[in-house]
Image (cartoon, helix red, strand yellow):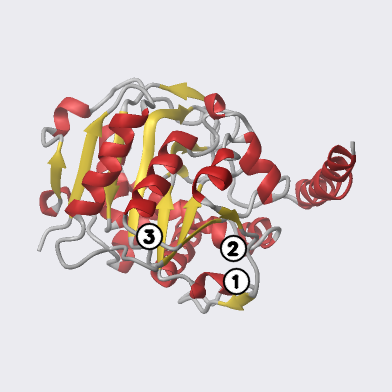
Amino acid sequence: MNPKILLRKSDAYHPGPVEGFVRESVSLFSEKGLLFGSGDKVLLKPNLLRGFAPERCVTTHPAVVDAVCRVLKDLGVSRIDLSDSPAIGSLEAVANKAGYSDLQKRYGVRFVELSDPIPLVTEENIAHLKIAGSIREYDSIINLPKFKSHCQMTLTLAIKNLFGLVIGKRKPVLHCLVKNDKVTFGKMLIDIAKHVAPSLTIIDGVTAMQGNGPINGSPYPLGLLAAGTDMTALDRVLAEIVNVPINKVYALQAARIRQYGQWDLQHIECVGETDLDSLKVSDFQLAKYPVDITFNPFRLAKSFLKQFYEVGIKERLSSSN
């Protein structure tokens, strides 16, 4: 059976339409049984790369996360936790800067640091790959990526977003262990995606990031929300919309090689907005100067020092004032 992808145009983060999209997504992908039920424990995985305000488009917009929480509460979900592994800053500080602070009061959401790293064996035998074992305590995981360009991997969408479940500074180290082979890095992302297996992915593309992403790009009014259970199909459809070939989206190229999910557009069913051509844009800009997947030792050391300063000094001083 061809996987379904739900697409809806949305030119702003108005609570009503965004919540309507989330409810439609849960209903559509519950055809084989409820995705989320009474008493479930659910983990939300947004993109919380760095602590910036929503208008910077670095992080998943809080309106999307808020709508997901509201729908889960209506379904009787007993516990909603939110987690990611920011590049700089603690999870709570980054989440608050991204506009998530009200989620704790409104829905009892907990910001939970990733813990219990466990080895994950890959076909490429990438050493030191460990993923948060703490995700095993949840009944379901909801993947909530931000649609962004990426200077190393071209686009960061559904599959790439799950890399955030690798704890802390293990991530830049893993960048260096693939010997600057972006497809090999993509294959590692596929192994992570298989292991995590989120129940649902909802992609925030209302205002996307173009250019020198995933941090230093500029907002782009893509005006789109997308959802699905097949992450490869989701990424394939969205890459088509911004006119990026599959061989340039290295996570998709790896998915095609590994035969993970559906990458052939002829075998993907779009629901909601069914005319894919009407959604395509021609002016979405990728990174002007793509960079290697490997970080040089100086950049790694600088990243470690920045994280130490941000969490060990700056945040502590701020909380004590």
List the residue tagged with mark 1. 129
List the residue tagged with mark 3. 254
CB under 8 Å between discs 3 and 2: no
Q: Residue at x 36, y 25 (%)?
A: 14
Q: Position of residue 23 (x, y in %)?
A: 26, 45
Q: Is residue 82 above or below residue 61?
A: below
Q: Position of residue 115 (x, y in %)?
A: 65, 69
Q: Amino acid at mark 1?
A: Leu
Query: What secondary structure is found at the residue carrying circle 1?
Result: loop
Q: From mark 3 to mark 1, how far is it between C-alphas? A: 17 Å
Question: Which image quarter is the C terminus in?
Answer: top right
28 to the left or right of 255 = left
- Please identify the quarter of the rendering in which residue 318 is found: top right
Q: Amino acid at mark 2?
A: Val
Q: Amino acid at mark 3?
A: Ala
Q: Residue at x 84, y 42 (%)?
A: 319
Q: Residue at x 55, y 34 (%)?
A: 58
List the residue tagged with mark 2. 166
Query: Is tag 3's residue or tag 1's residue first in the polypeptide sequence?
Result: 1
81 to the left or right of 321 = left
Q: Residue at x 42, y 30 (%)?
A: 208
Mark 3 neighbour class, 10 Å CA radius: few under 14, some 14 to 19, many 20 or more: many
